[in-house]
Structure formats: structure tokens, C-alpha cells
Amino acid sequence: MIIQTEQLLALGVPEERIYIDRGFSGTTRRNRAGLDQALAAVWDGSVFTVTKFDRFARNMSEANEILTGPSGRGVLFGLGGSVYDWNDPFGRLLLQALAMVAEFEANLGHLRTREGMALAKKSGKLKASNPSCPAPPGALSASATPRARCPWPTWPPSTASDVPPSTASSTGQRPPGRAVARRS
């Protein structure tokens, strides 16, 4: 998170124009308020900039969806110090190829995680259990309700100790991405 912010500042992006998805990975488009804010902040002639493509989108369909909207408003896409036009055939080809590679990397990571978990389970090192839903704010004890059916949101965490580290995760997810808008 800090490295990407420093990279964006070095590219000339003003600090107030850097939008961060805290606690979320770029795996899916859902629940990415920082990305939504960045997309809303761009206008004709601005450059929507990210430092790493795989922090922006992890599959081809979502990359296509995200890039198509702003490009219709005259917004260009910046990747590091380079700028690409989604409406230009070469720019679109390059960005689609990057989206394809990002999707491949994400799928490969998921496959390796599943293989590792299967091996750990086989050797008795992984004991699967149904996680319980954390207690709602103000409750005295945790409910035995499965997490998938929690009636209340489990994010953001209630304490700073509940926040996962931003540089690594045992689930195979990468740190959250940075989306910014800058004037070209």
C-alpha cells in the first residue's frame, strides 16, 4: 500500500487524488469503494492511473467493464508511467493481454492454494471446521450462525488487531489495489 502510494506520488498524482480500497483485494469488482470513487472522479482528458494492473482487475470481463465506461468519457488509462487509450486498437490489445495474464495469475494462485489445502488435509494438518459468525456489535457472546449466513456485515473489523496485514495474506489474496485519477 505504501509503496504503491509512493509510486503514484512520484508519477505526479496529487495525494488527494489517490483512492484506496482498504482491506479488499482486486479479485472482484464488488465492494471496492476506492475504485468507485476514482472512476467517478475522472473526466474528459484525465488519466486513470494504477501502478500494477493486477491490483486494478484480476479478470478480463471486469477489466473490460471498468475500462469501457471511462473511455467513453474521454478518459485514458495509465499504467505506471505509460498511458493507453482503450479506444485505440493497440491500446485495447495491450490492456486485454494484461487482463488475460492477471486472470491467469489469479487462477493459478487459486489452484495452488486448493492443492496445498488438499495436501494439508490429507496429512492431517488442516482441520476444516465451520467458522462461526462473529458477535454483532454490543452482543455478549458470538453466535453459532455460519459466517455465510451472518445477518450483519463482518467488515470493517471492530479493532485494529482484526485488520489483515496489507503486504501478505495466508489466503493467497494480494494486497488491495490503488486507483487514481490524474490530469494529463
Image (spheres, rainbow, N blue to C red):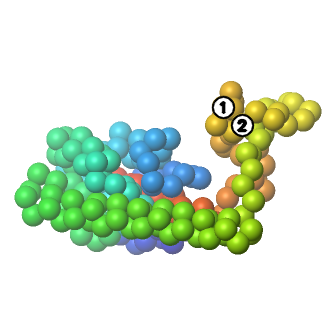
Amino acid type assigned to the residue bearing label 2 in the image:
Pro
- Cα–Cα gap, marks 1 and 2: 6 Å
Q: Residue at x 18, y 65 (%)?
A: 94
Query: Residue 12: which quarter of the image?
Result: bottom left
Badge 1 density bin: few <14, some 14–19, many ≥20, Cα 10 Å: few
Front position in the image: 49 or 137: 137
Q: Where does the N terminus fall, quadrant-wise?
A: bottom right
Tell me, yes or no, whether the two marked residues, 1 and 2, touch with CB atoms within 8 Å.
yes
Q: Is residue 127 in view?
A: yes
Q: Quadrant of the C terminus?
A: bottom left
Q: Determine the image quadrant of residue 167.
A: bottom right
Report how many numbered discs are placed on residues in the image.
2
Q: Is residue 115 above or below residue 66?
A: below
Asked if residue 88 lies left or right of residue 148, the reply is: left
**Disc 2 target residue:** 146
Q: In the rendering, at what x and y percent does residue 82 appear?
A: 24, 69
Q: Position of residue 84 (x, y in %)?
A: 18, 61
Q: Residue at x 17, y 41 (%)?
A: 72
> Helix or strand or loop: what does disc 1 sit on?
helix
Q: Nearer the viewer, residue 160 or 123?
A: 123
Rendering coords of residue 180 (x, y %) = 38, 54
Instruction: Give the labeled residue for mark 1.
Output: 149
Image quarter of residue 96? bottom left
Instruction: Residue 129: give x, y in percent of width and height.
Output: 74, 50
